[in-house]
Image (cartoon, grey):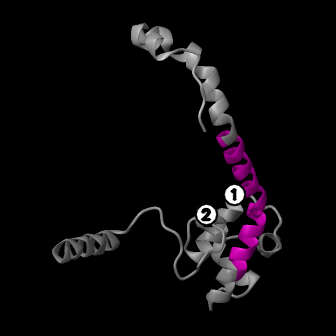
Amino acid sequence: MRFQLPFSAARLATTNVKELSMPLIKPYLAESVKPFLAYSLNYDLRAMKQCDPPEKILADNLKTLMDGHVSLKSEAKIAKAGGLSQRTVNRARNGLQVRLESLRGLSKAFGLSPWQLLVPNLDPKNPPLLSLSKEEKALYERLRAAAKTLL
């Protein structure tokens, strides 16, 4: 997108940069950026509308985790492992709101962090990580060193 500035090249050569800055350029810059901002904001709003609510994400992840754990296939076993009532586990599985303390208990039962239960499409065999363990860091460094020798 091209736009015309309200001054000529001759004025630009003789004008102090401070004098030329924002009061003259700002309206034109704003006009050129408007379509981009409108697209970006609409895109972000569409993405937010498509995202499932956290209660549904938690319910889906609990079902996936229960299918993947032999010892935690029932609500009663999860409740006992997490220090919760069976009713609370049932509420979470049915996509109803649960308290933060309940989320902590559910994550404790599965050996995860609370935030991991709220990641859409959780893979029980490969949960998301924020940081690497010492062993993972050592492996990463060895792989990096091996890659350098190959290149």
Q: Nearer the viewer, residue 44 or 90?
A: 44
The answer to whether residue 53 is above or below residue 72 is: above
Residue 79: in sight, yes or no? no
Left or right: where 103 falls relative to 147: right
Q: CA distance from mark 1 to mark 2?
A: 8 Å
The answer to whether residue 26 is above or below residue 20 is: below
**Count of numbered circles in the view:** 2
Residue 100's disc is 1
Left or right: where 70 falls relative to 41: left
Left or right: where 48 falls relative to 128: right
Residue annotated with mark 2: 114
Left or right: where 4 falls relative to 43: left
Q: Image quarter for residue 108? A: bottom right
Q: Main secondary structure of the magenta part?
A: helix
Q: Nearer the viewer, residue 23 or 49?
A: 23
Quadrant position of the N terminus in the picture? top right
Q: Position of residue 145 (x, y in %)?
A: 20, 72
Under tag 2, what secondary structure? Answer: helix
Q: Nearer the viewer, residue 148 or 97?
A: 148
Q: Callout 1, which amino acid?
A: Leu
Residue 73's disc is none
- The region drawn magenta spans 36-63
How packed mark 1 is, by other alpha carbons closer than 10 Å (few <14, some 14-19, many 20 or more), is: few
Under tag 1, what secondary structure? Answer: helix
Quadrant position of the C terminus in the picture? bottom left
- The residue shown at (46%, 17%) is 9
Q: Are marks 1 and 2 in contact (CB under 8 Å)?
A: yes
Q: Callout 2, which amino acid?
A: Pro
Q: Position of residue 55 (x, y in %)?
A: 77, 64
